[in-house]
Image (cartoon, grey):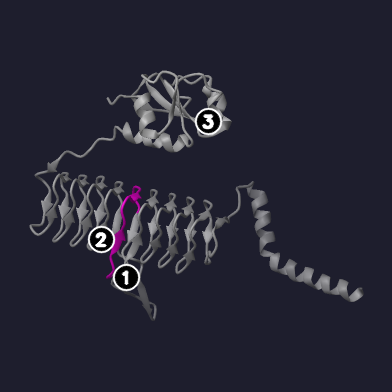
Amino acid sequence: MQKVTLKELGQQLGATVKGDATVEITSVATLEDAAQGQLSFLANSKYRAQLEATQASAVLLSEKDAEFYQGNALIISDPYVAFARVAQRLDTTPKQMLGIHPSAQIDSSAIIGTGAAIGANVVIGARAIIGEHVQIGPGCVIGEDSIIGSDSRLWANVTVYHDVHIGQHCLVQSGTVIGSDGFGYANERGTWVKIPQTGGVRIGNNVEIGACTSIDRGALSHTEIHDGVIIDNQIQIAHNVIVGQNTAIAGSTTIAGSTEIGKYCIIGGNTAIAGHLTIADGVHVSGGTNVTSIIRDKGVYSSATVAMENKLWRRNTVRFRQLDELFNRVKQLEKSTKGEE
């Protein structure tokens, strides 16, 4: 079990220590669930009432909330980011054992970097390059000519097809498939003719990809995921999509082929984005939105309807179908009114 004092954490975070600087912290928790030895945080002042009852040994607070808490605290401008930093330091996620498991099958032309850990039943294809200190979990498959950058980690059963490049310090969760064929077909008198997907996938540094996500390879050029992107679970990214630096994409989102998403975007969960579109930098798309046209300007974009009683929804659906008729009737009434004037 790791232990760290408030003084040490304050120095690491650049925070001001309030109270006993020698208090030892072993883990993190919410205000409601925290116990002795744990550090919590208050990022939203509407939960300020929980400060009085918390059993945390210390709390991360902003200056505006510090006066409402008499216990040990670390005062910092952004408690939530500070909480994330402390959680990283005290992270108990197990690491892959060093070395190569005897059941791994590694082509003789593959290059394995110093300190790499390769789990049971891993398959690594010809000319693949595994960087230094990479961790590859049990059951992973790394295809021919693919590259995994140094200090990256793949959890169990990740499949990386051929000609996929993953950068440094990346994290890929279990069940994800990177480099599968894009949905490319031509129709010849009712028969589908497959178009070979000869591009690859290029993933930058410090990218995190959730479980059971699919990222298709490019049809001709590459599918690109740029530095710092975070991708949630069960997301479909089609061929030749480009996702800009530090964009975040929440779960169950689907992005159709050849769409380009800008930098610093936030895409809410269960969003559907049509193909061959461009989304500007800094766009925030609300969850459940259907994006069917180009977004040129930074801002917040939303669509879809809220849940309602089924009877009301059915009536509104009928009325929605009548909108065009109603619109034309209003136009005729306006013309009639103007004629009478």
Q: Secondary structure at mark 1?
A: loop
Residue at figure coordinates x 65%, y 58% from the top left: 317
Amino acid identity at mark 2 = Val
Q: Position of residue 126 (x, y in %)?
A: 13, 61
Indicate the position of residue 55 as horizontal and vertical percent values.
Answer: 45, 19
Question: Which disc, if any, is residue 63?
Answer: 3
Q: Disc 1 or 3, which lies upstream in sequence?
A: 3
Badge 2, how many Cα within 10 Å: few under 14, some, many 20+?
A: many
Q: Which residue is label 1 attached to?
A: 221
Q: Which residues are magenta?
A: 198-213
Three-letter code for the amino acid on which mark 1 is drawn: Ser
Confirm whether residue 30 shows in the render: no
Question: Which secondary structure, mark 3?
Answer: helix
**Label 2 secondary element:** strand
Instruction: Indicate the quadrant where residue 324 lies.
Output: bottom right
Quadrant location, the N terminus: top left
Which of marks 2 and 3 precedes in the sequence? 3
Q: Nearer the viewer, residue 169 or 154?
A: 169
- Residues marked 3 and 2 touching at CB (< 8 Å): no
Q: Residues within 10 Å of mark 3 (few under 14, many from 20)?
A: some
**Residue at 39% in and 29% down:** 10
Task: Residue 164: give its label.
Answer: 2
Looking at the image, tell me whether mark 2 or mark 1 is earlier in sequence order. 2
Query: Eyeballing the image, is 86 above or below 115?
Result: above
